[in-house]
Image (cartoon, rainbow, N blue to C red):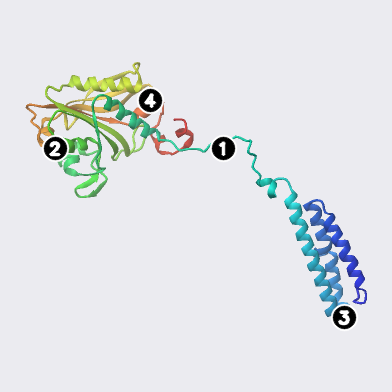
Amino acid sequence: MTTSKPKDLDKIAREAQRAILDAASLDALEEARRAYLGRRGLVAQLFDQVPSLPAAQRPQAGRQLNELRDRLERAVTRRREELQAAAPGTGLAAEAIDVTLPGRRISLGRQHILTRTLEEIERIFFGMGFEIVDGTEVETDEFNFERLNMGRDHPARDTQDSFYLADDLLLRTHTTVVDAHVMVGRTPPMRVLSTGRCYRRDAPDATHMPVFHQADGFMVGERITMADLKGVLAAFVRRMFGSEAVYRFVPSYFPFTEPSAELAIWFNGRWLELAGSGMFHPRVLEMAGIDPARYTAFAFGLGVDRPAMVRYGIPDIRLFWDNDLRLLEQF
């Protein structure tokens, strides 16, 4: 190459630009770019010849080659943009909207199965005349234990005496604590249901979790008996699980009821406890300011998680806490 023959560079520029413009695909364009602008392309070969030129000619030759390289690089960039814009799935064609297609349905959230079960339990008892009340999850030792006939040294505390926030404050271990609050200052008759989360030191297994949900109800009035309790819970079982549900009451013990019984239902080949129940101990009524000689009362603590397991055939209570949409979207 000599600077006395600029027409050679013009010819190379025309040939290179033609090759670039004739490239019908990105792959063909890349081949043309490598042939002229690659590390071993024609332009690079011309640059390698510059040091062999006379010193006076080198600056002009360098400028000419730089201009050629820049011109070809711009041509490659323009052609690449043209090919990309024309490619299927890109450019304006890709952004077009087919207004004849059906709209995409927005996926909406839904209530958790435990929330739905809790609300259904509330509706059933509301239909039987129960007032629905709420209470705080942080409770005092007095109302959580002592007003329910569980003193400081009572052995019934062993499985519940946990999750303390201070010496006298803890996360409630049952919603029965709401009963102790509601009865204070009220005059019988009363028919109340309280619901919410409870906390105990239960080790997780198929039927236990340290956090669970409970619906606790009580009825206070004159001549309230164990027969009223059984009638209310039997009506609940029929409404919740159908008339074919198999259930039973078995004797049990709770510090705040006497006599006491457990409600169990046949599930997965065994009896599953649903509720503890019984007649309020006279001391519980006395501490609430209610005369046990005139009034009697029954109470029950009904789990929410286990009825949901029975109702929907869910074998393991831990599945409620996995947040697995494959399960939750079924209900």
* CA–CA distance in space, label 1 to label 2: 55 Å
Name which residue type carries label 4.
Answer: Arg
Report the front residue among 266 and 12: 12
Going from N to C along the chain, the mark reached first, 1 or 3, is 3
| Circle 3: residue type | Gln
Q: Could you tell which of marks 4 and 1 lies nearer the N-terminus? A: 1
**Mark 1, secondary structure of its residue:** loop
Q: Which residue is mark 1?
A: 104
> Where is residue 159, by image quadrant?
top left
Assess disc 2: are there few (<14), some (14-19) or many (≥20) residues with their C-alpha within 10 Å of its C-alpha: some
Name the amino acid, label 1. Answer: Arg
Label 4 vs label 1: CA separation?
33 Å
Looking at this view, name the residue that lies furthest to the top: 244
> Which badge, 4 or 3, comes first in the chain's sequence?
3
- Residue 245, numbered circle: none
Q: CA distance from mark 3 to mark 2?
A: 108 Å
Residue 199 horizontal side relative to residue 180, left or right: right
Residue 290: x %, y % from top left: 10, 32
Residues 189 and 35: in front is 189
Q: Which residue is mark 2?
A: 184
